[in-house]
Amino acid sequence: MADQPTLDEFRDECVAFLDANATPRVSEEKKFVWGEGEDDVAMFEEVDREQERRELAEAQAWRAKRFDAGLGYITGATEYGGRELPGNYERLYGSLEAKYEVPNQGFFGIGLGMVAPTIKDHAQDHVKAKYLPALYRGDLVACQLFSEPGAGSDLAGLQCRAERDGDEWLITGQKVWTSGAQYSDIGEIICRTDPDVPKHKGLTGFVIDMKTPGVEVRPLRQMTGGASFNEVFFNEARVPDDHRLGDVSQGWAVALTTLMNERASIGSGGAGGGMGVADVSRLAQMLRHFGLGESAVHRDELMDIYTRFQVAKFTNQRALDKMKAGQLPGPEMSIGKMALTDNLNRTGAFVSSVLGPRMVANTGEWGTYAWSKFICGTPAMRIAGGSDEVLRNIVGERVLGLPKDPGIDSNSAFKDLLKN
């Protein structure tokens, strides 16, 4: 672009904006000291709904300020409020903003990391114009409506149906494990529109207004005690046909676009899949505090965990760089998601071996029982974004070129049963 600023000019622009609107973080990170500060290491942040609403309002105000300053959709098309700058400009802004105290932007992770890219690739032009600027400005928050009670990892087996009614579709069914549904304005939903064809070929995607009559959101209580997820019910909720994503019965391609972006987002968590726990200082100090600092077995396990997180970090970065260069996410993103869950499981096993009974009995001792929420939250990560088993099949078949895993869909003896 003729008016593209240099990186130095863009840096100056970003710093000027941040200095004028945010408070710099303390330049020197406080060194972690065992027993000091907050010991919360929960997998999912669990806050009450009132606090959540306050934090969302603050987050939206910050995104609006960013967007209005030309820093909210740095790589996006100008027609949608973007700057059409290369990915390294966006990464530069992210690295600079990380040095300032800004409201929690986690509310927008699904909308901007998964739903917005799908709208950009599959929606009609006027729908893109309606939603993309609003999503990137923070005026709207989006959720992903894929999983069902009987169709999680086997997404193509979903039964939530959409039936044509003139220029609208009537959606009836249930979705589950929907993060952020309680505060989302729109959702990306995949429905069955043709039950008489093979299951992958009878799906259609839509953008649905979450305030539409017939949409009901109910919180799901987890074993951690919180309710980070929801189940969503649809009772003939109406969606305009122009809010369809792609062609009728082409929803599988729409879903894959979202899933690959989802696995990229989840797998890259913290640039290494650490979710904030891959801090070797915390784990090393835990060893020393409980008298295991010289244990050769524990030291070896700790360095194995650290090494695996670093390998995941660099592997994910290569894949993300491909995406930021304009290439579509591929099945290799499944590797990042698999590495994340494996690393979290290894971390949980390591912590359990160090703490023993201290982790299951709340004595009030710092850095012990707090880990129980991490352990209870980890199983969810083995499911979110595709179960470990499904992802192994994806990697085996699409990356390694192994034969397709046999299933009932590939057995002709069952095909007639599936239609009935």
Image: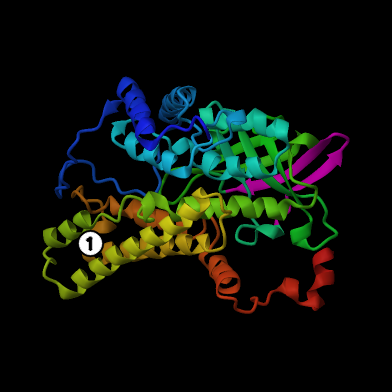
Front-lying residue, 113 or 196: 113
Q: Main secondary structure of the magenta part?
A: strand
Location of mark 1 (residue)? 355
Is residue 251 on the magenta stretch?
no
In the rendered image, the residue lying farthest to the front is 2
Q: Residues within 10 Å of mark 1 (few under 14, many from 20)?
A: some
Q: Say what amino acid the circle numbered 1 marks.
A: Leu
Residue 228 image position (x, y, % from top left): 47, 43
Q: Residue at 42% across / 43% down in the picture? A: 88
The segment highlighted magenta reads: 158-176
Q: Residue at 76% across / 77% down in the picture? A: 411
Q: Is residue 344 left or right of residue 163?
A: left
Is residue 170 on the magenta stretch?
yes
Is residue 148 shown above or below 102? below
Residue 192 image position (x, y, % from top left): 76, 51
Coloration of the structure image: rainbow
Residue 409 image position (x, y, % from top left): 74, 71
Q: Is residue 151 left or right of residue 194?
A: left
Q: Quadrant of residue 13?
A: top left
Is residue 37 shown above or below 19? below
Q: Residue at 30% across / 24% down in the picture? A: 19
Q: Is residue 292 left or right of residue 322?
A: left
Q: Is residue 176 visible?
A: yes
